[in-house]
Image (cartoon, rainbow, N blue to C red):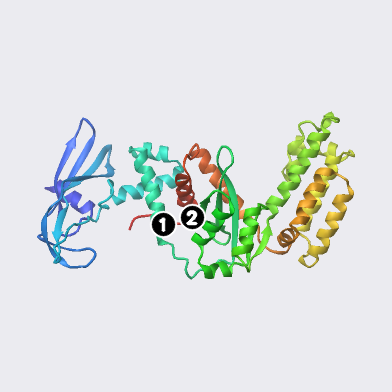
Amino acid sequence: MFTENFFTTLLNLEDGWEVQSIETDLGNAEIYISISCRLQELADDQTGELCKVYDHAPERKWRHLDTMQYKTYIKCKLPRIIASNGKVKTVQPNWASGYERHTYLFEHAVIDLLKATKNQTKTALLMRSGFNIVNRILHVSTLRGMGRRNYSQVVFDQLSIDEKSFRKGHHYITVLSHPNSGCVLDVGEDRTKEAVKSLLNKSLTPTQLQQVNAISMDMWKAFITTAQEMLPNASIVHDRFHLVKYLNDAIDKVRRREVKQHEELKNSRYALLKNPENLTEKQRIHFDAIAGANYEVSKAWQVRENFKDLFSSQKLYAWKLYLKWTVDSQKRKIKEIDKVVDMFNNHIKGVVNALLMNLNNAMAERLNGKIQELKTVGKGYRTFANFRSAILFFHGGLNLYPH
């Protein structure tokens, strides 16, 4: 009896519920804890009505936390009550959901381990359970966390929207995030205008859409047109990361064109694209040799550095300094650079807003890197539903735990 009472205490069973017996399967290293309810009346958890116990449902089994090296299961024939309206209902226990086959404590441990490993397969291996159980817990806890969100009174004055490749080929997702909290609000399948509209409507109320005063993004047309239509009070900001990336791509194109005539430009990609303070000694020597020569790639590199300097200039002169930068850049007659400058001028408002406003996609890009880590650790995701749940589970700032 000591053992039964001991487990009754550990399981924190409600009054009237007790451990009836404990079976041990030494061959399979498993323990089965049988629980029974000795009460003749139980309350309806929805109405609070005290109802008579009608009968007991067939025995169910739930996976629990391991006892030492033994897998542990809870077994119980849940009582069924008959309400005053004649309906028969199965009473739900306090250790698990009647719809699952694991206990709340097991689910809690799986969530903790998922957070630590970021890998469902490893978590299943460490918990000695099937992958499907871990995958279901990830989905259920994410759904529960999203249901607990209450953003009805939150003012989302700034947003970030970014794309992320999903599978090989042209398969993308759209990630909507909140720079101030650093959390993903939600994820949409594809990056079309319809997908972005649906994502914004699902994530924010009509009032909140009116309250957004700035949204950072790259120059993807669907993002721009959707923001213009749905966020009437928001300034579009083409963030620094993407703008510099366009210039980096132009520098690399110039380098690949010129390397055919200049052998010394071979293996110089990282020396030209990395920030000067991050160069290794070998890369610095290589860079100094290139910078001292009159190559077009050296001039293209200077254009990029001049553009980066605009972000540290006084905001009051942002327009004037940007226009001066465009004139200076086009004077160099580098076709790859001219193409980028023309693109910037076609989106001039968003580019100058990046210089004027203290908003960029730095947080969104960090999230992008973390999402890429999820893909790498998880060795890819075959379905959008799995990928979305994983992103929100790890980076949605959700309250995931049962109870």
Left or right: residue 379 compared with residue 355: left
Left or right: residue 175 compared with residue 295: left
Q: Callout 2: few (<14), some (14-19), or many (20+) C-alpha neighbours within 10 Å?
A: many
Q: Of the residues under marks 2 and 1, which one precedes in the sequence?
A: 1
Q: Which residue is rendered at x = 47% and y = 56% of the image?
A: 397
Q: Which residue is rendered at x = 16% and y = 39% of the image?
A: 23
**Helix or strand or loop: what does disc 2 sit on?**
loop
All told, the count of numbered labels is 2
Above or below — where is 192 with respect to 123? Answer: below
Residue 81 pos. (x, y %): 14, 59
Q: Amino acid at mark 2?
A: Gly
Q: Amino acid at mark 1?
A: Gly
Numbered label attached to residue 145: 1
Q: Callout 1: few (<14), some (14-19), or many (20+) C-alpha neighbours within 10 Å?
A: some
Residue 14 pos. (x, y %): 19, 58
Q: Is residue 236 visible?
A: yes
Q: Quadrant of residue 31?
A: top left
**Helix or strand or loop: what does disc 1 sit on?**
helix
Q: Point out the image quarter for the C terminus.
A: bottom left
Left or right: residue 198 compared with residue 337: left
Q: Which residue reaches farthest front?
A: 194
Q: Is residue 38 visible?
A: no
Q: Which residue is rendered at x = 60% and y = 57% of the image?
A: 160
Q: Report the residue marked by disc 2.
A: 396
Residue 125 pos. (x, y %): 37, 36
Above or below — where is 110 with respect to 52? Answer: above
* Badge 2 vs badge 1, beta-carbon distance below 8 Å: yes
In the foreground, 62 or 246: 246
Above or below — where is 79 with respect to 319? Answer: above
Q: CA distance from mark 2 to mark 1?
A: 9 Å
Above or below — where is 204 with respect to 32? Answer: below
Residue 375 pos. (x, y %): 52, 41
